Amino acid sequence: MDAPTSASADKSGSGGSRANAGWFGPSPSARPSPGPSEKSGRTGQGDGRNAEDRIPSRPVTPIRPVGTGGERSRTAPPSPTPAPAPIPAPESVPAPESVPAPRSAQGPAPAPTPPPAPRQAYEPERAAVADAPEDTSDPALIRRTMAEIEPIADKVTSHFYALLFLQHPDLRALFPAAMDAQRDRLFKALLTAATHVDDPAILTTYLSHLGRGHRKYGTRPEHYPAVGECLLAALAQYAPQSWSPRTEAAWVGAYTAISQIMIDAAAEDELRAPAWWEAEVVAHEMRTSDIAVVTVRPDQPYPFLAGQYAALETPWWPRVWRNYSFASASRSDGLLSFHVKAVPAGWVSNALVHRARPGDVIRLGPPTGSMTVDHSTDNGLLCLGGGTGIAPIKALVEDVARHGRRRPVQVFYGARRDHDLYDIDTMLRMQQTHPWLSVRPVVDEGPAGELCGHLPDAVCQYGPWHSYDAYLSGPAAMIRCGVDTLRGIGIPSHRIRHDSIEELVGARN
């Protein structure tokens, strides 16, 4: 299964999968930067867009080299705190004097002029709001930049890659032929970092995953400064309203910290696992005209947990990686199986479904994902699998069976039509073997008497589910709807597990 979203993650232009090409790759050598007057035409090989933006003439703050362990300090430049504006003291209003008006000999005395009204008392609350200093903290400055470039994110990222490939042309060969999805992923990564810049726990988890994933591209610590300088130059070019020396210093500090988290995570991961595994295709079974079960044998032991997924690269599309879930728990023979659906314009999925054959060799990235079973509790499992999302659900059932505890497992297997339930026979055989397992097929368009409708809605017809942990796998839209539905029927968020391509970026909404 295409792990986070089985239907969309392999589209070459969607940027759906989380383990696709990273921000950058290794740089064998760095060339001198072009002069201020040079312009870029197209960004090298196959970028497909005009890089119409010139390189900024003014220099940007250099990103200092970073290392590992005790080689560097993570201290960011201090943020000066502006002095609060002085609040004026209320003026003293003298009491009006009572002066008799002179009488005129030619007419009656004029009516006495009323004294002026006393000035309104000073309102400290209103003045405090009016005179409140602008937030110039580093997180605020970074978010201000992101808000300014968000409407033109595509131009910003195009300019960034143009700068990167002009100044470091050897990097271009390390990227996919098509860069559209690459631009989307870069901006999503920046947006995630900016959104959680003042939440170290979330940011460290996200960036550590990113750093480990970058190992398969050959990324090394010395590549980070060049990327950072090109990134800052692009931001300065397209965020003139929010950019200032203070903003630039905030971004230098943030990028240095971001880089170091990724470098440390990669260095730690290098001690226990290779950057990728070679795996030979040993079986290829077509289940429908566009779904295949692909079984591979890794060249060395590949430890993983049921419910996780891995990035796959085919020999036909180098440097293009897509996520697929493991379709079984770990096996004694070491074989791994994946359920792959060929989607329109899907480079990896179409290659695996229609081109791969036994004997072909693919690459596997490291296992990742948190949709795993907590074996320390006796809670039941409520599992929703849509389309090829049934693959990790099947693995979870095998994992429960292996641990030998009779925990109730309720599986709702959804598809558009009957014939799309390509793995229903396997699931029904497992139901006959394990009395604690119940499998209910759900189809959007089915004959009377079947459980029909949207998969999350069908779950509401059963229950109660207060003693269950929920697991969701399938298209992104199904996951989002399913999470809302499960929360609505009383399952707390911390007991709902899934893998989604928008896991962190979507958190801001």
Image (cartoon, rainbow, N blue to C red):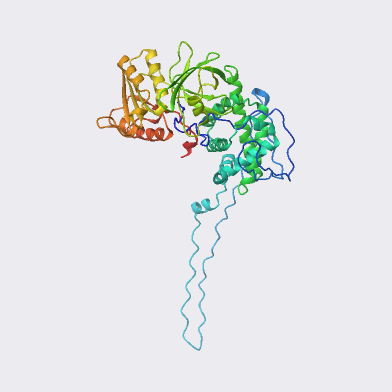
The foreground one among 126 and 91 is 126
83 above or below 262?
Answer: below
Rendered location of residue 318, percent (x, y): 59, 27
On screen, residue 90 above or below 405 = below
> Which of the 4 image quadrants contains residue 74?
top right
Residue shown at 55%/61% (left/top)? 92
For image coordinates 65% across by 24% down, the residue present is: 68
Quadrant in the picture for the N terminus? top left
Q: Which sits in the foreground, 239 or 346?
A: 346
Tell which residue pokes out farthest to the left in this image: 449
Can the viewer see residue 355?
yes
Percent of width and height locating residue 396: 40, 20
**How far across and down, in percent of the image, does residue 154 sit?**
57, 42
Say whether residue 292 is left or right of residue 298.
left
Residue extending farthest to the top is: 332
Q: Nearer the viewer, residue 121 or 82?
A: 82
Compared with 115, 232 (above or below) is: above
Please provide percent x and percent y for residue 294. 47, 20
Can residue 78 be seen here? The reply is: no
